[in-house]
Image: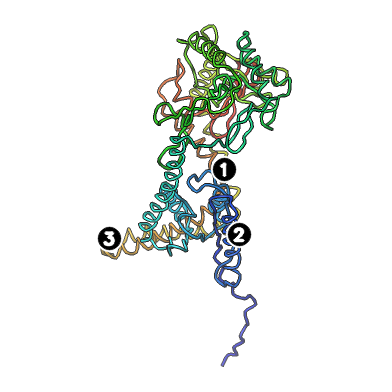
Amino acid sequence: MPTVTVIQPTLTEEKTAKIRCAAYCRVSSDSEDQLNSFMAQTRYYSQLFEDSKAEELIDIYADEGITGTREDKRGEFQRMMKDCRRGKIDRIYTKSISRFARNTKDCLKNVRELKSLGITIFFEKENIDTAKMTDEMMITIMGGLAQEESTSISQNLRWGIKKRMENGTIKMCTPLFGYDLVNGELALNSQEAEIVRQVFDCYLNGSGTAKIAKTLNSLNVQRKGKPCHWTAGTVKLMLTNEKYIGDQLFQKKYTTDTLPFRQMLNKGEREQYYYSQRHEPIISREDFDKVQKILNEHKKSFKGIKDSRIFSKKLYCGECGSTFKFKCGNNKNYWVCRLHDTESDRCSNKQISEVNVISAFIRLYNKLYFNYKEILLPLHTALQNLKLRKFSGQAQVMEVRKEIAKLREQSHVLARLKTKGFLDEAKYIEQIAGLTVKINKLQTELKKLTRSDDEDETLDQIEMLIDFFEKQDDPITKFEESEFESIVDKIVVINQHELEFHLIGGLKFKEKI
C-alpha cells in the first residue's frame, strides 16, 4: 500500500476584500447652526466604519455653505464623482436625497451613472438603497420632493423681498462707489463722491469712457477694496446708474422660477420698483440727463453696424492671456485684447480684424478637410496603441479580458446548440441572460481598471473630428458658425500676423493672417 504524505498549504487564503465606501455630506449655509450640522455629519461618518468588518471608509466628501440646487457649484461632489469614475469607490453613503441633490434631473442622472459603474448609494433618511432596482421610482419621487422643497424656499424668500420692494422697506446689501452702507441705507462717501463728480464732468467735456478708465487706473483709484482695474464698461455703468441722482431702481435682474435657478436681466419680464429721492445725490439731475443724451447719441451712431459676437470668449491673447472683446468702427468689426484696450503699456498685442480671423479659419478648415486622413487617422491609431500598451501588461486587466473572452465563447456555443436543435428556446434565453450579466459586470470592472479620463476624452474628441470631416461634402467658401463651434475650442492670438487654433482633442494648428 502506497504511503501518503500530506503537504500543508504554504499560502493563506486571501481575505475577502472590504467594500470601499465614501460618505457625502453637505450643509446649505455658512451659519453657525449649519456648521455644527456639518461637523456632526463628518464625525458620524468617521465613526460609522471604525468597527466594520465588511466595509471601509475611503474618504469623506463634504461641501460646506454651498447651494444644493446647482451641481457645478459643489466642488467636493464633483471630486467624489471623479473618484467614482476612476474606480476608487464601491458604495456611497449620504444622509438624505436632499443632501445629495435638490434637482431631480441631476439626482437621477448621477444615480444612473454610478449604477452603470457598479457603485451603489444608500440614502439613510429615506432608507433607499440603489442596489435594489425597484428603488429608482422612489428616488424619482423623493428627488422631486427635495426639488419642490428647494423651489418653495426660494419662492418664499422672493415673495418677502418683493413685499419689501412694494412697501419701501427694502434694504441695500452692498454699497456702490461714492457711498457707504449704513444700516442698509446709502450714505455719502465724500472722497469717492468727488471722483464720481470728476468722471461725469470729464465725460460732459468730451472724454470717452476708455480714456476715463485709463486715467482712473493711472491714479490707482480703488473700487471698494478691490484691485484697481477700471474699464470702459465699468465707467459706462457709473454714468448710467440712477443712484447717483438719489434715486433707486429695484429688480434690474430677476431669478428664474425653476431649477437650476439663474439670474436674468429684467427686460420687462418682472415688475420694477423706482424710488425717487431715496438718499443724498452726488450728481444733479440736469447733468445726469445730459450724459444720458450723449450716450444715446453715441448708440445711434453705431446703428446699422453688425454687432458680431461669433468669437466671444473664443479669442485669447497670446501675450497676457486676456480674452479679446468686440469693437466696431468705420463700419468694420475687429477684436482687441481687453488689457491692451485699457492699459496698452501692460500688453502690446494690438487689435485684429474679424475678417482676417474668418479667413484664417476657412483656410485651416479646408486644409483639414483635404488632409484629415493623413493627419487625424494616424494620430488616433497611435493614441489607441499607446493606451493598449499602457494597460496590456497589467495581470489583472489580462485576466478580466480572458474571462470576458471565455464567456463570449460560451455564448457562441449556446447559439450553435440552439441552431442545431440541441437546446430549446427558453433554456437558451435563460443561460444567455446569465452570461450577459456576467459579461457586463466584467466590462464594468475592466472599464474601471483601464479608465483614464484625459486619454479617453482625447480619443473621443479626435473621433468626433474624424467623423465631422467624413460627413462634409465640400470645402467651405464662407464662414459657417456651426462648423466653427463644432471643431474649435479657442483661438490664441499670437500677434497681428499669426493665430493658433486650439481644436477639440487638444490639437493645435498655427495659421498666418
* Quadrant (top left/top right/bottom left/bottom right) for the C terminus: top right
Near-viewer residue (328 or 455): 328
Residue at disc 2, secondary structure? helix
Q: Position of residue 152 (x, y in %)?
A: 41, 48
Q: Amino acid at mark 1?
A: Glu
The mark nearer the N terminus, 3 or 2, is 2
Residue assigned mark 3: 420
Tell me if residue 204 can be seen.
yes
Closer to us: mark 3 or mark 2?
A: 2
| Crowd band around label 3 with a 10 angstrom C-alpha radius: few (<14), some (14–19), many (20+) | few
The mark nearer the N terminus, 1 or 2, is 2
Kindly identify which numbered label has been placed on residue 455. Answer: 1
Residue at disc 1, secondary structure? helix
| Crowd band around label 1 with a 10 angstrom C-alpha radius: few (<14), some (14–19), many (20+) | some
Q: Position of residue 310 (x, y in %)?
A: 49, 22
Distance CA(mark 3)–CA(mark 1): 45 Å
Residue assigned mark 2: 39
**Farthest residue, direction bottom:** 1
Residue at disc 3, secondary structure? loop
Horizontally, is 342 left or right of 305 in the view? right
* Quadrant (top left/top right/bottom left/bottom right) for the N terminus: bottom right
Q: Position of residue 75 (x, y in %)?
A: 57, 47
Q: How many marks?
A: 3
